[in-house]
Amino acid sequence: MKNALSILTVPAFDDNYLWIIHDGQHAAVVDPGDASPILEALAAHQLVLSAILLTHHHADHIGGVIPLLAHAAVPVFGPAKDQISSVSRPLHQDEQITVPGINLNLSVVEVPGHTLGHIAYFAPKQHWLFCGDTLFAGGCGRIFEGTPEQMLHSLDKLAALPDDTTIYCAHEYTMSNLKFAQEIEPSNPDLISRIEREQHKRNLGIPTVPSQMLLEKQTNPFLRSRNADVVQRLFAAGKISARQNEIENFAALREWKNHFR
Ligand SMILES: [Zn+2]
């Protein structure tokens, strides 16, 4: 029977999360990197696949699309600029879609940086955000194709969403991200208490994802790269010279994280 929409967390590979949004009957899947855990979850919950939503072209996000289409010929929504051959509904900035089967309205946010075509999906009614590998709990994606300037502006777009937005990112990278955050802001009280809470979840084997936008703004260094303490830390660590602009500061922060262990 049809219910209000809810979301299933489907772990895949070492640390990916695939998301199933469903109403008790029909289901849309976000970034199905692998088909088999999706098919198992659909069967276990007696759900009929009605749509596939993709954020970007990396294999761990699209690898399950072809086998899922063999199982059910459903529309595939995805970024127009990321050139994914299985996409039947290419999307651009500010496009509004209604996901077939589950009647979910989503608006499209282009967030280049990790890939050039990367998009995120925001549900204006539920305040859900599906952001792939752009914003992570406590961190952000690597800049593989775009520039630091693009990534900073993409994160700014996401940070402008409501504080109570629930963030469904695609990986369990949280503890490693927060270890870096602690290096940047060791005395941030929100960060200290977050690390305790998230470590407790990991000890119990519970996902730390989804997270919330307000918490990200309080603790995620990549949403705080203009914060005076963060800039001061970059300077003190010799990552920037005294006078640099916000893009160079953000780039230095991302570069530091790339090498941080
Ligand atoms: Zn990726």
Image: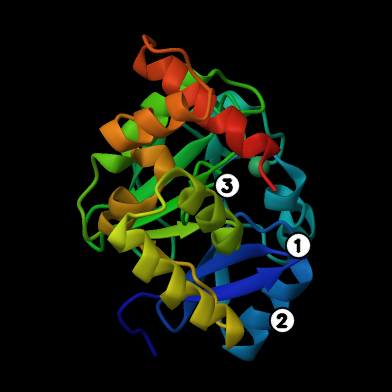
Q: Residues within 10 Å of mark 1 (few under 14, many from 20)?
A: many
Task: Measure how far apart labels 3 and 2 are at the Cα level.
Answer: 20 Å
Does dot 3 land on a helix, a strand or a loop?
A: loop
> Residue 60 location, x and y as percent?
73, 51
Q: Is residue 223 above or below residue 63?
A: above
Quadrant the N terminus occupies? bottom left
**Badge number at residue 34:** 1
> Residue 193 location, x and y as percent?
35, 70
Say what amino acid the circle numbered 1 marks.
Asp
Horizontal side, residue 104 vs residue 168: left or right = left
Mark 3 or mark 1: name the one nearer the start of the chain. 1
Image quarter of residue 103: bottom left
Horizontal side, residue 161 vs residue 61: left or right = left
Residue for point 39% across, 47% down:
185
Task: Measure how far apart labels 2 and 1 are at the Cα level.
Answer: 11 Å
Q: Mark 3 points at which residue?
A: 54
